[in-house]
Image (cartoon, grey):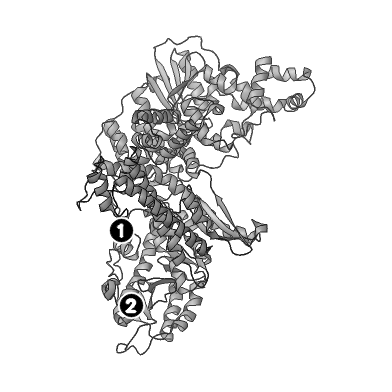
Amino acid sequence: MAESTKPPQPGGPRLVLIDGSGFIFRAFHALPPMTDAAGTPVNAVFGFANMLARLLRGHEGTHIAVIFDAGRETFRNRLYPAYKAQRPPPPDELVPQFALVRAATEAFGVPAIELADWEADDLIASYAKAALDAGLQVSIVSSDKDLMQLIRPGIVMQDPIRNTEIGAEAVREKFGVTPDRVIDAQALIGDPVDNVPGIPGIGPKTAAQLLNEFGDLEAVLAAAQTMKPGKRRDVLLQHADAARLSRELVTLRDDAPRPLPLEALEARQPDEAKLAAFLTRHGFRSLMTRLSLSADEAALPQAAPAADARPAAPFGPYAILADAGALASFLAEAQTTGLLALSLGLDASDTPSDAPVGIGLAIAPGRAAYLPLAHLGSLEAGVPAQVTPEAARAALAPALTDPSLLKILHDVKAMRWHLGAEPIGPQDDVMLMAYAFEAGRHGFDLEALAERHLGQALTPLSAFTGTGRNRAPLASLAIDRLGHAMAERADCVLRLRALLHRALREQHSLSLYEQVDRRLGDVLFDMEQAGILIDAEELKRISVEFAARMAVMEADIHRLAGRSFNVASPKQLGEILFDTLKLPGGRRMKTGAFGTDAQVLQGLADEGQDIAARVLEWRQLAKLKSTYADALVQQVNPRTGRVHTRFAMAATATGRLSSIDPNLQNIPVRNQEGGRIRAAFRAAPGHVLVSADYSQIELRLLAHVADLPALRESFRHNEDIHARTASEVFGIPMPAIDAATRRRAKAINFGIIYGISAFGLARQLGITPAEARAYIDAYFQRYPGIRAYMEATREQARAHGFVTSPFGRKCWISGIADKNPNRRAYAERQAINAPLQGGAADIIKRAMVHIPGALTREKLAARLLLQVHDELLFETPPDQA
């Protein structure tokens, strides 16, 4: 770019050029997925609109424009066909946002410029030169290294995320050369991202050294002839033409045509009505508040008319399949519809050994029937017999595996325990279908789904049987009475599938359901069947030891209290703490007793009250004793000698699995007692247990979704991430980081994931809230992408009620609009963490889906037994460990 003969005057007119294309991709990858009310992805649009609003509020430009790429192909592809050829097409979720970003630019009243066959960077170079020639200063809003060649007196770059100026010194720090030598440096280095060849083996340091010693590219290539023999001389001579081609590819063309004259770029105020309509349409409420705009009600999306106005088939009447012939005819009819929905009549105990009393079957909306299997007593008139469970199993088995018949169930994994161990396929699970886009929004039992999506109120089976001690078994009910309820359930399951499949597609969650959740059920079923061996005698020894230690602790607590009392009684403990000992902070609950939960006790312990600390230790040991040391022994299956947990697939708001009956995911691993419990888990004779886990997976996800290059680089090089954070935040070289400083950084790293407050961090580190606030502020200043991520995530939760994991799972946040500020703040912390916890859950579930096939391919005899959030536990022969 030629030097201007008319240097701009400081404080004079200024042209602000915004690298729109660069920012679209940066915003898309930095912010979590968001959709507007119409279901269109808008995270890049939201990030861009926020950046533009912030820039328009603070910029000093008299002229302004946003520059976009017009397409993937430019004149450089004719010059060198491999140029950027390896770049993948933009993600599907980003494609519809290109037009919306241009619409946002127009709504803000800023000129948008693009030109076919030219890159945005060329247009920026051309407008920058024209502005300099006209006596304007130029600010280029971008952090793209390719634009650094344009920096000179009168032209600076502005990083839109860090809000810092990039001048000649920053260029020298990055490339080791002045801006006028950036082109030569890039020609030597090349760029694998854009397929610019450069010279193999020449990196930034070597390029800077050569250019600072010899001058420009041609001088370096000429000097190669006289260099001492070696690899550097050889590659310079061999690849000289590639370097010259590279220089031509990276040089920005300041003679590119300019679609609009400079005069057309004069800054102007946006049309507020037009801007309000755009922001309202896409749900950017916080941005409207910041800009003091009122919502344009006319811009809100209107409900679309129903696609199918035909009346729905009525729920019933339903048939009773009283013999094998009727069942065979019904299953034959299922072949014509291609659908078979099932609902099992199970007693409340719902243990894996339970056989269903009867089965509801449906093959089309309103076309359902009941198959009685094990009713007791006399049968109703006109029902001469029931189908035996054996005959029913024999008739159903081929249908459950028929590849031409789609089976539709609610909680397929649980049903396999009652229908037989063979996989059911092909199948859809309406519980998991709803969970993929409504996690955390409501319950996923069949009654809740039918009410929510079909408007059908199912009568709970407890209404027929009663509850408690007077509960009657299902088998005692009349066939026709239970039959209608079970057939109605099967009918609802079938109807739900059609609605939820359409909703999954509209909510962009179909792939998540089909590729992860649906496939995971069979993996988890095999894990539940496998179970895990425990050493019952060791657990009994641990229980005795824990009881002895608890007795010693109780004596110590009684000494501190001044008298004996029941430590396990919250009421008595509250009286001791707040009536007898007069400790501060006592608050009575509605029952009149003092609150003594963990938060209350921890607060007292933090203030130095030994009795509170001892009670916390006693409670932890008591929980380990009762929940694990004692209970696990009782839950050993006498037939297998193993404990068989069950994995709940739709119980959390983030997509995490939970373990129940017993819960094997909450055994603490960071204390000695929890470690002893885990050590009682054993491998089968001739086998060993192998644990594999993801390292700091949620921090890695934070580095990705918040676009933190420093943290990503640290993870790539397997650095101590907490020491790196301490170095970045506190400005201390990594070798000089001591244990206390690293501990502070670790607390911040993990605290940020959970939206920790200054008060919470202060309590963790034993410092003042003011010091904690200073640490958090320093962290955000060093990693501004985290603040942008948190703001966007809270915005999405407030605007739509949910946040989205990196894999598209919608996690609904309860209480995000609560009037109580404490509950609302808690919900906001949940919103910040949910995409990270949900993303981590989706990653390990994806791994679990692929593990059985991988073990088979590698001919390994290992079995997957347990999943503990980011950890998988295998049982395997020692030689395959």
Give percent across and percent down for residue 282: 33, 41
Mark in front: 1 vs 2: 2
Give percent across and percent down for residue 783: 45, 31
The N terminus is located in which quarter? Answer: top right
Give percent across and percent down for residue 132: 47, 14
Mark 1 crowdedness (10 Å alpha carbons): few <14, some 14-19, many ≥20? few
Which residue in the structure is indicated by mark 2? 474
| Whether residue 247 can be seen here | no
Q: Which secondary structure lies at badge 2?
A: helix
The kind of residue tagged 1 is: Ala
- Residue under the point 39% across and 62% down: 431
Which residue in the structure is indicated by mark 1? 306
Farthest residue in the right direction? 229
- Residue under the point 60% across and 40% down: 86
Above or below — where is 195 with respect to 482? above
The kind of residue tagged 2 is: Leu
Q: Earlier in the sequence, mark 1 or mark 2?
A: 1
Q: CA distance from mark 1 to mark 2?
A: 40 Å
| Whether residue 456 can be seen here | yes
Above or below — where is 20 with respect to 691? above
- Residue under the point 29% across and 35% down: 288
Give percent across and percent down for residue 98: 44, 38
Above or below — where is 361 with respect to 457? below
- Residue under the point 58% across and 61% down: 683
Q: Quadrant of residue 146?
A: top right
Q: Mark 1 touching mark 2, by CB under 8 A?
A: no
The C terminus is located in which quarter? Answer: bottom right
Mark 2 crowdedness (10 Å alpha carbons): few <14, some 14-19, many ≥20? many
